Amino acid sequence: MIKILDWLKQLWESFSHEFDFVFIQGGRYQQMLTGILNTLKITAGALLIGVLIGIIVAAIRSSYDKSRVRRGFGFTILKVLNAICKIYLTVIRGTPVVVQLMIFYFLVFVSARDGVPVAIFAFGINSGAYVAEIFRGGIMAVDNGQFEAGRSLGFNYVQTMIHIIIPQMFKAVLPTLCNEFIALLKETSVAGYVGVMDLTKAGNSIAGRTYSYFLPLLTVAAIYLVVVMILTWLVGILERRLRKSDH
């Protein structure tokens, strides 16, 4: 028993010394804090952009798929918009996110001094393509009778989508949407390619300066894991509340 206590004491002293050397000395913990903040900023901003794009693209594509009138000026406009959306989905889903990020930073926003807004925009555009298909699947799963019920209440198409279809769609796609948000959080780890001090970049930078890779990278992995667990817990609460509203 005494040997075990001595071993635990030595282990704690070794860990404390390593932690002090890696994070405390030189104020390197500030890099980690900056990385966490930038990662959360990029994820939250990209999430908002992705959901907005996803709703718009999904509404256009599902409207085209559900359209019964296949002629006229209105349908022609819808057909053109649907073609644009399909090109957007094909290009974004067919190219790596890190390549898209570098294109936005080095070509589109070449004069940008801060990489965080560029990363938010790039990841938002990328996430929007996947969210759009998730939303489209949810909208297509809603019974057509719901559209007819909205029209019978005097709603136009947009009002029917906002008040009837989209709320039901969110309930159906919430678990899948949560997985997309988790994937988005982890995808932001490539933001360091354009000089953004995100969480992964901070951990790698500290490891490069201290030549100690175990603790910095393990800390980065632990932080990602905790954030994902918190996000999953919050989505679980939201799902339970949505189920209660059905009764």
Image (tube, grey):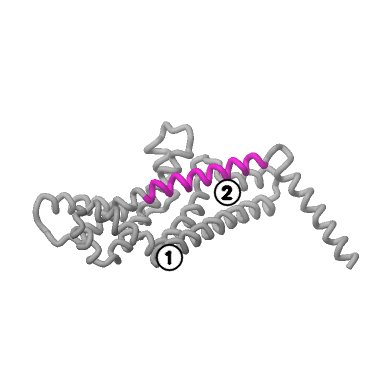
- Residue 42's disc is none
Taking depth in this image into account, of 137 and 15 the one nearest to the observer is 137
Is 183 located above or below residue 203 in the figure?
below
Q: Residue furthest right?
A: 2
Q: Which residue is mark 2?
A: 200
User: Is residue 231 toward the left or the right of residue 53 in the image?
Assistant: right
What are the residue bounds of the magenta stretch?
Answer: 29-51
Taking depth in this image into account, of 96 and 151 the one nearest to the observer is 151
| Residue 232 counted in the magenta span | no
Q: Secondary structure at mark 2?
A: helix
Alpha carbon distance from label 2 to label 1:
37 Å
Residue 229 quadrant: bottom right
State whether the magenta stretch is mostly helix, strand or loop: helix
Q: Amino acid at mark 1?
A: Arg
Q: Is there any visible trace of residue 86 in the rendered image?
A: no
Q: Which residue is mark 1?
A: 243
Q: Residue at x 53, y 42 (%)?
A: 38
